[in-house]
Amino acid sequence: QVQLVESGGGLVQPGGSLRLSCAASGSISSIAVMGWYRQAPGKQRELVATINTGYGTNYKDSVRGRFTISRDKNTVILQMNFLKPEDTDVYFCKAVDIVTTGGLRYLEVWGQGTLVTVSS
């Protein structure tokens, strides 16, 4: 079974930084894409940033230049700098197209979410 374990959320003042980490556990052979999404109450979940196995990245326009996504095999990091109050959300890690060493394939797996609050 594949699970994603997130860490690093919390409370930070505007202009501050936070680092989110997400590690995939299980007997994993490959993960095509890993990324971060966020969701506010009553709103749809939206893409923040993704990174593929070739380290190609994609960012939401409002975070480009402030957030950086990186990846080390089955761990994905989101470094968030110059945080703004509008970045306050629950952040979710997602892994897409996961293949296990046993040959099982998962289309997508989500983490449990971690709360980021930007407030003075």
Image (cartoon, helix red, strand yellow):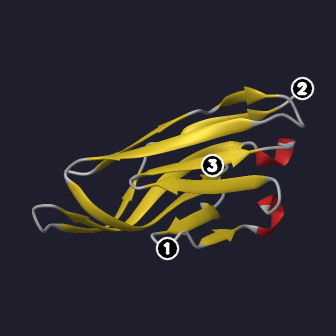
Q: Secondary structure at mark 3?
A: strand
Point out the frontmost of discs 2 and 1.
Answer: 1
Where residue 108 sits, quadrant-wise, is bottom left
| Image quarter in which the C terminus is found | top right
Which element is circle 1 on? loop
User: Residue type at mark 3?
Assistant: Leu
Q: Give the quarter of the image for residue 97.
A: bottom left
Residue at mark 3: 78
Q: Position of residue 105 (x, y in %)?
A: 21, 69
Mark 2 → mark 1, Cα distance in angstroms: 38 Å
Horizontal and vertical percent position of residue 96: 39, 68
Badge 3 or badge 2: first in the primary sequence: 3
Q: Which mark is residue 63?
A: none
Q: State the count of labels.
A: 3
Answer yes or no: do the residues labelled 2 and 1 have beta carbons within 8 Å? no
Up the image or down, 17 lies above or below 91; here it is above
Read off the residue under disc 2. 120
Measured as percent of width and height from the top left, residue 86 is found at 83, 48
Q: Residue at x 41, y 44 (%)?
A: 23
Residue under label 1, please give it: 54
Q: In front: 118, or 97?
A: 97
Mark 3 against mark 1, which lies toward the viewer? Answer: 1
Q: Would you say residue 96 is visible in this rendering?
A: yes
Q: Residue at x 83, y 42 (%)?
A: 83
* Mark before the other along the chain sequence, 2 or 1: 1
Q: Nearer the viewer, mark 3 or mark 2?
A: 3
Image point 79% across, 59% down: which residue? 63
